[in-house]
Structures are given as C-alpha cells and as structure tokens.
Image (tube, rainbow, N blue to C red):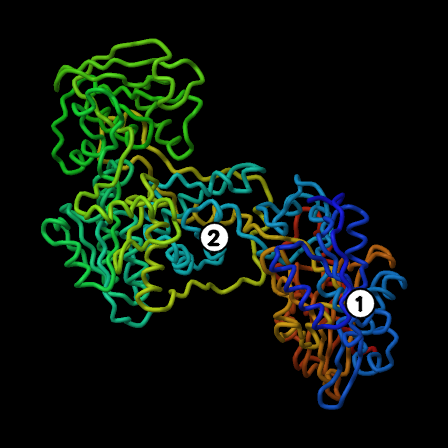
Amino acid sequence: MNSKNKIKQYRSPQNLKEAETDLEMYVKENEEIALQAGGTDLLTGIHIGYKKNPDTIININKLDQQKQLGYSDGKGLTIGSLVTLEELQNSNLVNEKFPILAQAARSVASPIIRQKGTIGGNISQEARCWYYRQNDPGFDCMLKGKTTCFAFTGDSTHHSILGSAKVAEPACTRACPTSVDIAVYMEKIREGEIDEAAQILLQTNPIPSITGRVCPHYCEQVCVRKKDDESVSIRNVERFLGDYVLDNPEKFMIVESKDTGKKVAIIGSGPAGLSAAFTLCKSGNKVTVYDRMEKAGGMLSYGIADFDLPKEIVEKQIKALKILGIEFNCGVNVGKDITLDKLAQMFDAVLISTGTWKEKPSGIKGEELCLSGVEFISKVNSGKNDTQKGKVLIVGSGYVAIEAARILKRIGSEPIILFDRSDAEIPGFIAENYQQALEEGVHFEYQTIAKEISGKVGSFTVKCIKKIAGEFGQTQKEKGTEITINAVIVIDAANQLPDLSFLPAELVEKFGQLGKQKNSALLKNNIYAGGDAVNGLSTVVRSISQGRKAALEISERINGVRPNEITKRTVLKTFDINCLNKSEKTVALIRSVDDRKKNAETENYVGILQSEVIKEASRCYNCGCVAACPSDIAPVLVSLDATIVTTKRTMKASEFFIPFPGRLNALLEGELITQIEIKDQKYSKQIYSKLSLRKSIDFPVVSVAAIFNLDSDKKVKESKIVLGAAAPIPVRVEKAEAFLIGKKIDDCVATGAAEIALEGAMPLLKNHYKVHAVKDLVKTAILSAVQA
C-alpha cells in the first residue's frame, strides 16, 4: 500500500461505544486504520506523502463526551481527550490551577493548529523524524519495524541526547536462532556488570562457551555497524562470557523456580538435549539425560574436532549442568537397555533429541563401500582412528566434509573434497571453516559429483562428473566431463539423518509430520521430539533453539504454566558515545597454518581479553530509535503525575510514555484515550519553557516542565523536573531534583542542578548543541521559581 491508494471507508461514530465497535471490527479484519481527531498530524502527513493512506479513517471528533473539561474539589481536573489546545490555553480554570499546562498548550505551533489540535492527539502523535516520515522503502527504520535507525549516524540535528528507545528487535537478535538479547548484555558489560551480562545470555543460550567457538554467528553478518565499518565481535564476547560461566558455575547454575515434582527424561545429550535439560531444570523439573555414547555431549563431543571445540570445554559444560541438578546416564542405549515405553512410564515426559548420526543415502553406485563422515570424526574424537594415510576422497559440501578434511590433513593424509558447488557458492555458515581449510592445504574439486565407487580399502576408484559452470547440486548428473580419482579411503559426508531404529513405526512416521508442522513437539501421549532429529541436520545454535522450544512446551503441558520468560523492559537504551567514531573490530588470534597442521588437538583460536571485550561492547550501537518526543504536553503531564484513561485501562503518564514495538507510547492498537485526570497540586511554582526554531513550528527542539514547592526561606521542599524532546519519551531528572532539596535557589545552585540533569548525556554526531540548550532551560526554569 502507498499514499496513492484510495481510502476505502470514512467512519464517523456518534459516541464512544460506536467508536470502540468500529475499532474492534477493523482490527479483527486486519484493516489499516487511522484515527482523526483534530487531524493536524494525520491529514498533513497524507497530503505531504510521508504517511500511507489507511484503509479506513475513523473520525472521532463527534464524541462530545470527550470534549468536556471539568474540575471538582478532591478529584482535580478532568480533561476529555478531544479538548483542544486552544481551550486549554484559554481556560481560566487551567490557568489558575495548572498554569504549566496552559503555558505548554499556548506554546504549540500556530493559532490555527491549536484550534484543531487536541490534547489526546498531542500526546499520541507520531515521531517527528524526517527519516521516519519519508515515504521511501529505503528509509524503512526501526520505528517501522525494520533494523536501522538512520538518524543514529546520520542527520541527528533534532534527535535524542539521552539514549534510544527499543521499538523493534535489533538485527542481531532477529538473526540469532536463540533470540539472545545481545544489545542488552553488551550494555551490561559497558556498565561493568559481567555477571548480569552472562545471566542475560544464559536466558536463551545455556551453552555460550560452545557457541562462542562453533556458531557461525549470523548476528555479526547483519550487525548494523557493518554499514559504517566492521561488525561488533559478538562471537568473541559470547565466548568470553561463556568461559566466565564455566569458570564460575556456582554463580549461574542455580534453580530459582520451585520444585514442580515433575520428572522429565531426555534421550540424547547433544546441543538440543542440553538446551532442553537446562530449560526444564531451571523451571523446577527433575531432569535425567540418557545417551548411548560413553560421554555426554552428543555431536559436541564426537562430531566436532578438538581444534574447533576442545573436549575439555564440553566436559566443563556437562559438569556445570550437573551442578544445576541434571543427571546424566551415559552408555545407555534406549531401545536395548531400556525401552521407550518404560521411560514413558517412569517419567512425566520424555523428549527424544537424538540428533542426526546416520548417513543419508546419496544414490551413488557403490556408496555402501564408503566410511561415514560422522563415523570417521567420531572415531578420531574417541582415539580409535585407523584411517590409512594417502589420498582420501570426501563426498560432501557441508561442515562435516570440511571438518573431516581438516582432520585428515593434520594426521598426514591428502584429502580431496568433491564439492558440488563453485568457489563462489560457499554458504555463510561454513565460510570460515572453508577458508581455513584452503589455508591448510585441503584440495577442493569444485562442481564435481561422484557417480560410481568401486574397489576396497587402500584402492578405491571413483568415477565423477565435472559439472558445467553454473549447475548446482545433484542435478544435471549426465552433463559435464567424466573424470576418475583414485583414493585409499572414500568418506561419504553428503548429509545425515536421525537414527530412529529404536522407535516403533508409528512414531517414526510422526517424526516426519513434526518436521513439517513445526508448531508442536508432541509425538504421542507424554513423548516429545525436538532438535535435529525432527528438523534435520542443522547448526549447533539452531539445535539449541529447537531444544529450548520443545522444553518450554513440555514444561507448560506437564505443569500447566509456561515458564516465565518476561524480562524487565528497558525504558531508554544507552550507548557509549565513542561508538559513533570509526573503530576496528577485535579479532581473535588464530594459530599459524603450520602450527595448526602439526597439532590436531590444540584449539585454533585464542579468546580475547576482558579489556577487549569491554572495547567491543563499547562499539555496540545498542540499536534503538533516537527520534525525540514531539509533544509539548507530554512532559507537563509527567511532571503533574497525571493519569491517562483509555478504553481499555488506566495508567500514569510516566507509564504511558514507554516505548513499545512500532511506537513511542503504550497505546495499543484499537485503544482510545478517553480522558486525562490531574489531581490538585501542592506545587506553587509551575514553569514550562522550550526552545523552538520559529513560533509556527509544531514541535519543541527541547523543552522543560518544572514544578517546585518552596518554604518561607525560598528553599526547595519538593521539585519535579521533566525534559521534553531530549529523548524519545519525556525524561524526569530525579538526581537534579534531589540535589535541589533543602537548597536556597541562586545562580550557583541552578547551574549545579542543570549540570546534574544532563549527566550521562549521549549526544549524536550533529546535536551536541541540545545538551547546552537543555542546561540553559533547566537553569532558567529553576531561577524562575524564585522570580515568579
């Protein structure tokens, strides 16, 4: 839809009930609705073209009950949401009882705007940011649900100097399969709260020490900072926090929920199983993990080489989870040592998360002669490798194929990977491993597929097709040039499947259905499934996400309550102003190629130092919206501790002006402001002042609403100071208020309070002037309290 689309309907309800009915109907039908009161914001936006034409306009200007302005002793002032700004400025009652409100109304724009504009419209108007108000997809910003705030490093002349608002999930969190709130834990690191940062990370990723080593980190690929220089080194920060957790498990492996009395069995101790176990145990459930291998960890222990993931890290992770209370029964083969039905009888729920250990048939003639890629890596990790040295042919184009080749290179073999892609078609999730394999001397036969395998161990012949440039995958097998390659061993690492041989046929069939539905982990009765066993071969971090998702469903089903995932909402997001400067990304040191090839057991990368972690956290933009609150009335209502009444609820003004997805206030879709209530004030001095570019402009550059109660010696007994247009929401400066208490106002005191009010200011590239402007307004407002 664009601004040229015609408006389908124009509704004009005669009373509040009709308006509510219209709103509910159109919201239910997913119609794009716009409310028209005074229309000063809506109609101007449509006319200029920055605002899309809605499907329906609902004109609420005939709701006469919302146009009333009244006062009663004990209750104070009641203002209907459709009372105009002109009525407020001219009201004798408002001028007498609440002069600050009349002052603010009088300061808005021009007389014609004040005649039409309403108090409800003023406090709920949209952001005055030129990027947001561009009807151009190229400027689809965070406030429109996208991932970039263009003003942050762009033209920020009239934008926030006190932080940003979370109006959408940052790009990094959206890209992360576990939805880790990366920006928040970076903020905690900047504040020196390492423990809190680690706790935030653990909320959705219980094994960050592992993902900090093997995750492809989709988050870094979409980091908004990349548009200016280089992404934040999120993986290295995550690894540091993960290692910190493992070094201090007693701080973090704590069950805070009450014991539910429920027991859950998990079959498989790979990333999905560990994630599910952690989530269920943290929710107060007793968890027992079964695994047929001798050591816990699944593919983490057996499917990844030591140089990428040292086994001591996996062992420390398992030890930490045991401290949490998770029990591990390894060397138990479910289906042989104990039946699935027996587990289902012993436990309230059973989760199958056995991963993908079985090689998927590739259709190559003679494929039964191959050694499985997973089997080969598992043997090496178990110290049972007996692979002959010499030329080894690997069929496959993914992580397992490359990992096997790099291991072979280290033990003196000559690996050749039959890669069905070109060197320009490397998927992002294996790009780093691919590059290191090239450095280490692994040979790739690009766009080559195996057609027939014959021979025996020590003497294999593989007939291949060298595909025509541009052909991808296993298609067009008959096109291209035939070549023959001899090898001592052939490893099939093309793809993997779950081994479901321990399950009855009916459950095997349901596995396929779960993989398609992806909306529930329930197989049958109290038996569930999750992770790669259901969804197919994936990355470690995706498996973690899938395990956690299954665990949340299980916990909700067996306990009747979903585990509490609500985190405290941040009102304003902070950042280090130095992040606006160009800076280089901290890169983890990697061992030399020669050293890597000689030593198969030493980790390739060396983690970064804590000082470097803090530096990287300081580079984070903490992406949010930096549009400034455009309302003159908003800071006044906060200073007066006003109550805002809507068709759905009642809230304090300070609660109303809190950022939410897609908006800078708490107003929900389909919700109408009906009235504003202000109780009688004990504050005798009320001052509103603002800086604007010209009198006719309709928003403040900065503003201050200040109210004071002085004693007979003109010392401050009580005060409230609220800044407008200095942030996406009105900001009360409580430290400055506290500083004033008991002091007699003079120039020195006013200057000191103004300095305190702007402590921690975060001006952007082009709005440093606003810091000085706010200080001047605060100082002037304080001095006016004794001059009035």
Vertical arrangement, residue 333 with respect to residue 214, above or below: below
Name the amino acid, label 2: Met
For the residues marked 2 and 1, what is the alpha-carbon distance in whole angstroms?
A: 47 Å
Which numbered marker is on residue 591? none
Residues at circles 2 and 1 in contact by the CB criterion of under 8 Å: no
115 or 614: which is nearer to us?
A: 115
Tell me which corner region of the image, top left, top right, bottom left or bottom right, holds residue 113.
bottom right
- Whether residue 94 sits left or right of residue 758 in the image: it is right
Q: Residue furthest front?
A: 506
57 or 42: which is nearer to us?
A: 57
Q: Secondary structure at mark 1?
A: loop
- Residue 164 in sight in this render: no
Percent x, y of residue 235: 40, 43
- Where does the N terminus fall, quadrant-wise? top right
- Whether residue 167 sits left or right of residue 175 in the image: it is right
Which numbered marker is on residue 61? 1
Name the amino acid, label 1: Asn
Mark 2 packing: few (<14 Cα in 10 Å), some, or many (20+)? many
Circle 2 sits on which residue? 186
- Residue 24 in sight in this render: yes
Vertical arrangement, residue 578 with respect to residue 405, above or below: below
Percent x, y of residue 673: 69, 70
